[in-house]
Structure formats: C-alpha cells, structure tokens
Image (cartoon, helix red, strand yellow):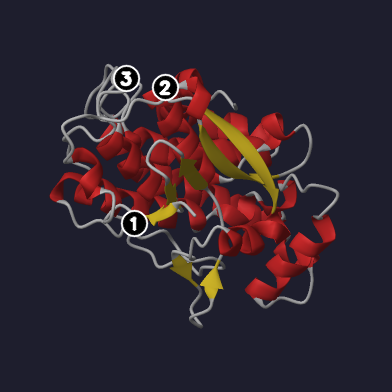
Amino acid sequence: MPTTTTTTTTTTSTTSTTTPTPHPSNSLTFYDIALRPPVEKNCASPNPWKARLALNFKNIPYKTTWVPQPDIPKLRRSLQVPAVRQFADGSDFFTLPLLHDPSTDSLVGDSFDIAVYLQKTYPDAGAGDLFPTQTLDYTFAQDPTLVVPLTQSRDSSPQFAEYARFNVNVDAAFTAHVQLTVQGFPFDPETEEAVKAEFVRRAGVSGWEDFALEGEARVKMLEAFRETLGGLGKLFARDPSGPFLLGARASHADFIVGGWLRMFRVMLPESEWVQVAGWHGGLFGRLYDALQVYAEVK
C-alpha cells in the first residue's frame, strides 16, 4: 500500500541528495471527477484543475483516472487516503483530486498539498518553482454560506504560507458566487440523479430547482461577482505586463484562480462568461487564455 502523504510528511523528499526523476514508464496517476462526456471538454471541478495546471507546469508524466462522483468515498477508503476536509457537523467530505506517485510510493489527497508535494519532490522539473516569493495580500471579507468546506493547508512552512492564505481567500470569493454556475453543471448522465440528490441533501433544500438563480437576483449576484473580481484584480494590476501575477511568469497563485475560472467558463451561460472575461479591462479573460498552455487534459 502506498504511503499516504500530506504536505507535512513529504518534507523528507527534499532531504535526499538525489531528486526522484519521473519517467513515462512510472508516470503518476491523477484522479479527477468524471463529469459529462466528453469528459476532457467538460471536466470543470476547480480543485482538480488547480492540481492539473501544476502538474502540466512541472511537465511531469501522468495519466488521469476518471472517478464517478458517488464512487469517491469508496476510492479514498480503498487507497487509505482520509478526507482532508470536514463538513460543519464533523462528517468527512470525500472529494478529489488525489495523486499517486509510484516513484516515491506516495498518495496525496488535496489540490494544495499536491502542488506543495510536486515542488518539494521535483523542485527543478518543468518550468521550475511553483511558489516563487510574492505578496498575495488578498482577503475576501465576507463569510459565504458553504455547502462544502474550503481547503485548508496542513503545511506550516513559511515558503507556502502566503499561497495557502491566498488559496483559502480565493476559494471563499468564488464559492460566494458559485450559485451562478449550478444550473450549468455538466452532470454525467450515469450519476446525475444521485449527485443532484447529494447536493440537495448537503444544502438542506427541498429540490434541485431551489438552486435556480434568475431575474433580478441573478443580476445582483453577477454585479457582486464583478466587484469581488475587481478586488482580486488589483493584485494582477501590480505588474501591468501580465497576464500572470508576476507578469510573464506563472505561479501556483495563478493556478488557484485559474481552477475557478475553468469552472465558471464551463458552467456559466456563454453570454455571461463573455461578460466575466471582459470585466476589469479583460484581465481575467487574458489570464484564462494564457493558462491554456498548461491546460492539457492527459
């Protein structure tokens, strides 16, 4: 059984005098949520996308295993990878991504932990450092009502703390407006009814139709989303050469935002995505487009 790994327990990976070098014959396995076929076009879960962008940035050979959403708890239990997030009532929230690295016999079960693991284990791979030093002083002040818990980093290293805080705040900012995307969720027809029922149970509503956001309420949430992205956009405006936070150089902070942009790109009505991509001088549209170099679904 592979070793279950978090960002705390992978520290020994960089203490060796040699860095494991991935090779196509022992490529990593990346577990993502199966949505509507063709899954390569419709996969849109933000946290798996954060990890996918990091994997492609590192240019590490891997293959994706698609897991139906109702089967995720069974998968994690079978691999002995515990949930890293809990609901408000203390019950486990089993989700993906999950990464298995046969080179180190490790399993990593959270998107931020995966990025930290890749940086610690393969520091010089691909385009290099996922976590270059930068100031990420963005705070989302509201307290959104959460149907699912936000990711929290379990690594206390100062090298990653700025990014961990940024991850939590970006997650909160997009989650506060995620109702805009619900009606466009690309369900796998094989599991659609079961997944809808689980979403309804989590939210404590009477039916799927309760998630609908229309008319003036939708207009108000779109405007709130525009204002929220304006606050986040101030960080990107610091380096006008763009499109990334550090100008021409991408980092995991860009991937944190990019994972959410992927979700909204897939799930929003096309006319609304055009609006989002054009807000704030087209900043987030340019970011989304620039990230496509790291967006191959393997």
Q: Image point 40% across, 26% down: which residue?
A: 22
Residue 120 found in image quarter: top left
In this rendering, would 283 be left or right of 289? left
Q: Secondary structure at mark 3?
A: loop
Whether residue 109 is visible: yes
First in sequence, mark 1 or 3: give its number.
Answer: 3
Left/right of residue 133 with respect to residue 166 in the rendered view = left
Label 1 element class:
loop
Whether tag 2 and tag 3 are in contact, CB under 8 A, the answer is yes
Badge 3 local density, few (<14 within 10 Å), some, or many (20+)? some
- Residue type of the residue flagged with mark 3: Ala
Taking the view exactly as shown, the residue that stands out farthest to the bottom is: 89
| Above/below status of 265 relative to 146 | above
Quadrant position of the C terminus in the picture: top right
Q: Position of residue 166 (x, y in %)?
A: 30, 49
> What type is the residue that disc 2 sits on?
Asn
List the residue tagged with mark 2. 59
Q: Position of residue 33 (x, y in %)?
A: 64, 47
Residue corresponding to mark 3: 127
